[in-house]
Amino acid sequence: MGFAVAPLFRLAKAGFVMAREGVFGLAHLPDLPAAPRIAIACARLLERRSVKNKSAELRLSDAMNRLGPSYVKLGQFLATRADVVGKEAALELSALQDRLPAFGHEAACKAVAEQLGQSVDEIFVEFGEAVAAASIAQVHPAMLRGKDGEVRKVAVKVLRPGVQRRFQRDLESFYLVARLAERFHPPSRRLRPVAVVDTLAKSVAMEMDFRLEAAGLSEMAENTSDDPGFRVPEVDWLRTAKGVLTMEWVDGRKMSDVEGLRDDGLDLEALGANVIQSFLRHTLRDGFFHADMHQGNLFVEPDGTLIAVDFGITGRLSKQERRFLAEILFGFITRNYRRVAEVHFEAGYVPAHQDVDMFAQAIRAIGEPIHGHDASEISMARLLTQLFEVTELFEMRTQTQLIMLQKTMVVVEGVARTLNPHLDMWHTAEPVVGSWIRDNLGPVGKLRDAGEAIGAMGRIANDLPLFADRVGRMSAEFEKMTAKGLRFDKDTAEAIGKAEARHTRSGRIALWVIAAALVGIVARDLF
């Protein structure tokens, strides 16, 4: 058990910090078994007196920030998993802000020099103090002189020193909790807590390699080059490394400044629709989407163009998954609940032994109340939450590939509603979803699929001579084996000989042990 001492110690420390900040006071005791209820009651004895006047959001924010970047990311991630932590806890965690104090300017300059192989003064005309700091990195404004001598402003993102080591250490604790949950709490196995931590670990590992973020920006720029009202910053590849990302400086207004956007004379309703439709376009058309589209990562230019930054977290869907998503959304839009249920079975989200009609009935119970309310109350977040409420009833397993999608859909809807509180999610989504359905599942899509199938058959036909040659050589080898027996090359024969010798020695030793045991038994019986 020695290997588990350090993670256990870190978990105990985390528990102490959460108790001091009053996090355990947010638990709803009546619904818990006796043992956890007693443990939480004891933990509450450690609360600071000042926490009684704190909101749930502040308690969580203070605790997570004290514990460090790993726990901030964990809290944000769990906010997407209402099926794991519960609706109320997910709502409280969703308010957790990814804001930490900036690390020193000198440390940032040192990190840039180490990553780019030159001092900051050699690379930039000017390198300013950090203007934004999060759990993974912070951003500095800088001035860069181009080949033509013109000076332009850029944003330089610098990885926090030591953050990778810290995350790796804390992930050991997260894995320990997940494994214990799966071992000792069978109902949690359906939610796959270890797979949840795996997803978090992979996401954070990719987020800490800025070369991958730069590649994501580049891919998104190509995908959206012809999209109206959306773009991403241009990457400066020559001044980008694993721990440093240099890109175009964005002068637009942050989307969190709603009053400022209104003062600029922008159409907030159109802007909200653009957020929703851009996300759905990227997801369904490209299968590649920005998975962290909160207000802090979205800027608006004076002409209303939306600029997305911070591509550390992205999501992908295969063509098949995109078809399932589009059909599910379109089924809700058109109130075809039977088709929504069938798609869940086709995708394997619901086990085949369940009743499709019963599941369609459960889907109807979710969809009808949403369609029956005012547009301002039609919420994708509400729909997704209710969908997860039926997962246990129908033995649906967590689909880890959809975690990022679920999170982003909820966040994007929230962003759009800050701009237009009466946003009709389904009316706004219909042009993009309906168009994708017509293009990919209608006659045009079927013709395209047929063309792809013919192309695949053509590629197979081109490879047939190669296959025939391989089959011919295999046939010749089989004939040799039939005529002369199985033959090995020198190295293989020597390896088999050594293995056989080891096996023979082991066999002899085993025989001597058995013989000695028999002698011992006979001697005991005689004397």
Image (cartoon, grey):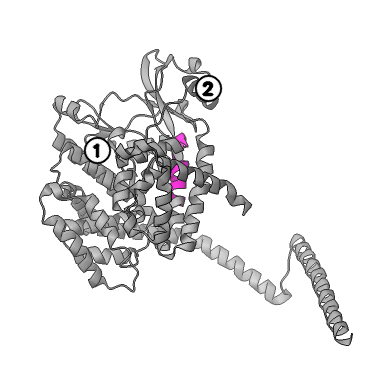
Is residue 287 shown to the viewer in this render?
Answer: no
User: Residue 334's x, y, as percent?
Assistant: 15, 58
Which residue lies under the disc numbered 1? 227
Confirm whether the magenta stretch covers residue 201.
Answer: yes
**Which residue is drawn at the image coordinates 45% and 34% (left, top)?**
210
Q: Nearer the viewer, residue 7 or 379?
A: 7
Cβ–Cβ below 8 Å for labels 1 and 2?
no
Which residue lies under the disc numbered 2? 110
> What is the magenta segment's predominant secondary structure?
helix
**Other residues around mark 2 within 10 Å, as few (<14) / some (14–19) / many (≥20):** some
Q: Nearer the viewer, mark 1 or mark 2?
A: 2
Q: Is residue 280 left or right of residue 264?
A: right
Q: Nearer the viewer, residue 383 or 87?
A: 87
Confirm whether the magenta stretch covers residue 204.
Answer: yes
Amino acid tagged 1: Asp
Say which element carries label 2: helix
Q: Which residues are magenta?
A: 198-211
